[in-house]
Image (cartoon, grey):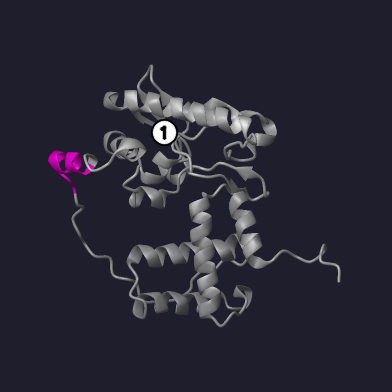
């Protein structure tokens, strides 16, 4: 049987289209989770034969049986709207009435300066630097993990955040207290790069096929992650690369870091 002419599987199409549209890896993972959940909920039937009624029942289930938060239900809806509009080419339109998850009204928790300093004093090394940047520069966790050497401008004391929320770039202030630690972190990145050049020539991951346009970018200091993962991994093409530290590591820092 010739498999070369067979159409790609549904989840492969979902991932491919999201990458073409430059969705973040986190969003790709989240949307794929909801699409799989939706298919399992409907007895493994193909989404193309279910349409709005299947989506309506699924959202009702999330609110009534699963008691999910409003943001979670909206996330699931967004994933399914994307599936039908961009993958199946069957826009959902009006899916009818369904129970909406309740949106609780809560005041945000804001730590005092003393509480922030107490938290920072419990951290050390790169974790302390990351937390200080998030506190002093207003960076999100993922934005901090994605920082590269080229994003730090010591002369103007600014940080460039690339492909942040909404896939938008922005600049933010670089706290003066972070400069010595950042300079040290860059020197560590340089040492790690020299080591990798001598042992396998492992490049860092690059955005949007930049490695084809600039083949040496992945092994240049400017493109190195400030906070790299502890070990290399395989990218989608099966090539050994070095990615940034996963955000979950920042939420549960090791006492050794």
Q: Position of residue 127 (x, y in %)?
A: 34, 40
As for residue 219 lying within the magenta part, the answer is no
Question: How many marks can you see?
Answer: 1
Residue marked by disc 1: 170
For image coordinates 49% across by 35% down, the residue present is 225
Kindly give the residue lying farthest to the bottom in the view shown. Answer: 43
Q: Could you tell whether 254 is left or right of 49 in the image? A: left
Q: Over which residues does the magenta segment extend?
A: 110-119
Horizontal relation, residue 212 to residue 125: left or right: right
- In the current view of this chain or complex, which residue is farthest to the right? 1
| Element on which disc 1 rests | strand
Task: State which quadrant residue 63 falls in.
Answer: bottom left
54 vs 143, left or right, is right
Q: Is residue 39 above or below residue 141?
A: below
Give the residue displayed 39% in from the left and 67% down from the top. Answer: 73
- The percent position of residue 78, horizontal first and vertical second, equals 47, 62
Q: Is residue 97 visible?
A: no
Relative depth, front residue between 70 and 121: 121
Give the residue displayed 62% in from the left and 76% down from the top.
46
Q: Quadrant of the N terminus?
A: bottom right
**Residue 156 seen in the current view:** yes
> The C terminus is located in which quarter?
top left
| Residue furthest top in the image | 155
Viewer-nearest residue: 68 or 178: 178
Image: 86 above or below 181 = below
Q: Position of residue 174 (x, y in %)?
A: 33, 27
Q: Main secondary structure of the magenta part?
A: helix
Q: Quadrant of residue 3?
A: bottom right
Residue found 62% across the figure and 30% down from its top: 198
């Amino acid at each position: 049987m010739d498999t070369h002419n067979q159409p790609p599987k549904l989840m492969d199409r979902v991932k491919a289209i999201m990458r073409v549209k430059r969705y973040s890896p986190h969003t790709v993972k989240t949307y794929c989770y909801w699409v799989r959940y939706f298919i399992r909920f409907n007895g493994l039937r193909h989404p193309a034969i279910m349409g709005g009624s299947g989506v309506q029942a699924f959202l009702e289930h999330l609110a009534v049986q699963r008691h999910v938060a409003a943001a979670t239900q909206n996330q699931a809806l967004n994933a399914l709207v994307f599936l039908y509009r961009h993958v199946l080419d069957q826009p959902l339109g009006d899916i009818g009435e369904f129970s909406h998850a309740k949106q609780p009204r809560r005041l945000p928790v804001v730590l005092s300066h003393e509480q922030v300093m107490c938290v920072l004093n419990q951290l050390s090394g790169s974790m302390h630097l990351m937390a200080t940047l998030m506190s002093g520069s207003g960076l999100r966790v993922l934005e901090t993990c994605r920082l590269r050497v080229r994003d730090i401008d010591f002369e103007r004391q600014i940080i460039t955040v690339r492909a942040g929320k909404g896939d938008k770039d922005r600049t933010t202030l670089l706290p003066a207290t972070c400069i010595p630690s950042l300079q040290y972190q860059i020197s560590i990145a340089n040492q790690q790069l020299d080591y990798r050049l001598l042992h396998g020539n492992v490049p860092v991951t690059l955005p949007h096929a930049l490695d084809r346009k600039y083949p040496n970018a992945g092994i240049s200091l400017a493109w190195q992650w400030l906070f790299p993962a502890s070990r290399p991994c395989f990218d989608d093409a099966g090539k050994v690369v070095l990615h940034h530290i996963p955000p979950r590591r920042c939420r549960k820092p090791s006492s050794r870091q």
